[in-house]
Each structure stands twice: as structure tokens, then as C-alpha cells.
Amino acid sequence: MANNYYDATGVLVLDQVTPVITALFGGLKLDASYPGNGEVYIAQIAEDSGAHWDDVCEDLVALAQSLGLSVPSEGPPTMDDVLAVLSRHFGTDQDEDLQHLIEHHRFEDDSDLDALFLIATRLDDGHGLKEIRFEGCWYCSKPRLFNFGGDGSFISREFSVFGASGQVLDLGNRIRQALLIQNLEAAANLFARETQRLLAGITDETQRRQLQHRLSELLS
């Protein structure tokens, strides 16, 4: 029998570790002392650590209580409940992106870095979180075909991007197949989709349009 695992490490780029950062990322083996120079270690290790939304919620409730805030709820407080209270405290309860997250995110099972980043940047207690850089790998206890790979995430206010090794294999194969039959239109569409995927990671719409225009000029 073969077992599959996923491990990942990365850093938070910020000014300092604060109670908000500890509440949100404490389940990811947060180490405020390493590597230093504005970077803080985080990790997700198979069968060892992970940031689950239930744990994050409990830590945020504890944070709210430490600030003298009550979290009203009919039962156990939910992420919606505690985020509503904390966002009012930090003056971000009218933030559209945060409200969209609260309304549409399920907050179940393992937490996701992009949601944690958004929450952290709207609950800034002096941490000044700027970026998350995270690299992971999945592997098998037996050398089975295509049971190994990696992925990477870069998350910031200005630009975010995600990539996985499987995407490279798929893209390379599809472009090659198009070139073999001289289907340059299909190959061009694949390049265009990949470029559009990268452009979609730019938060500012004006910058995105300007960069798209500049790319068109460079490729003409």
C-alpha cells in the first residue's frame, strides 16, 4: 500500500508578528524568529500541522475577547460572527472584498492562504503583512508515476499568482500537439490564456489594462 503526502513551507513578509498574525497563521507552525529580516516562517507538514478554519475561528474569538469585544451568536461563534465583530473594531466592516468573503466563503476544513491574507490585511493591528510566498510538494511512499509534483503561491495586495507542476505538463503537451499539426491558432490561444491568467492576478484594473496594452505593443 502506498501513502501520499503533501508538505509545504514559506514565509510571511511583514513588519512584525502580532496577535492577528498569530491567530490566523499559528496553525502553520509559525516561527517569528526565522528567517528574519521581515520574513516569518510558516509550514504545512503532512500529519503534523495545518490551519483549520475551526481552529482559526477559535483563535480569532480569543483575540476578540482579549480586545474586550463580545462575539454575539446563537450557538458556537462562527467565522462570520467573529469577522463581523473584528472588522467593525478595525474599521473595515464596509470593505467590499472582506464582505464578499464573509458572504460566500464556506470556512470549512483546511484554511486557504488567499483568504487568510485578505482577512489579515483587513485586520491590521500593526503587522503590515505585504506578501505570502509558499512552496509545496506532494509525494508518494512508492515511486509511482505522476505521484510527485510541486506548486507555488505568491500572494500580495498588488499581484497574486499560483502554479503547479501538473499545469506545466498539460500546457506543454497541448502546445506541442497544436504545433505538430500546424494549428497555430490553437497554440496562440493557449499562450493567450496563460497570459490572461497572469494578468488576472493584478488587482488594480487600470494597471491590468495598461500592462495588457504594453504587452500588445511589445509583441507586435
Image (cartoon, grey):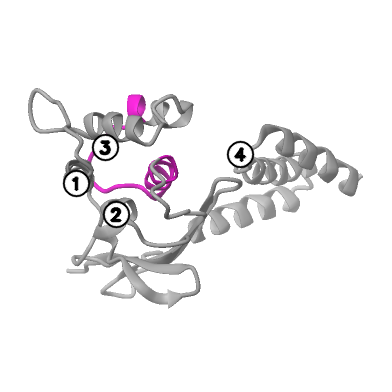
Other residues around mark 4 within 10 Å, as few (<14) / some (14–19) / many (≥20): some
* Horizontal and vertical percent position of residue 70: 16, 32
* Horizontal and vertical percent position of residue 65: 17, 42
Q: Residue at x 63, y 50 (%)?
A: 174
Residue 107 marker: 3
Q: Main secondary structure of the magenta part?
A: helix
For marks 1 and 4, give the one nearer the viewer.
Answer: 1
Indicate the quadrant where residue 147 lies. Answer: bottom left
Dot 2 corresponds to which residue?
19
For marks 3 and 2, give the one nearer the viewer.
Answer: 2
Badge 3 element: loop
Confirm whether residue 148 shows in the render: no
For marks 1 and 3, give the one nearer the viewer.
Answer: 1
Q: Residue at x 46, y 68 (%)?
A: 39
Residue 66 marker: 1
Instruction: Identify residue type, mark 3.
Output: Phe
- Residues rendered magenta in the picture: 102-122
Badges 2 and 1: C-beta atoms under 8 Å apart? yes
* Horizontal and vertical percent position of residue 179: 75, 52
Badge 1 element: helix
Gap in angstroms between the C-alphas marked 3 and 2: 20 Å
Other residues around mark 2 within 10 Å, as few (<14) / some (14–19) / many (≥20): some
Instruction: Identify residue type, mark 1.
Output: Ser
Badge 2 element: helix
Q: Is 157 displayed left or right of 45 in the figure?
A: right
Instruction: Identify residue type, mark 2.
Output: Pro
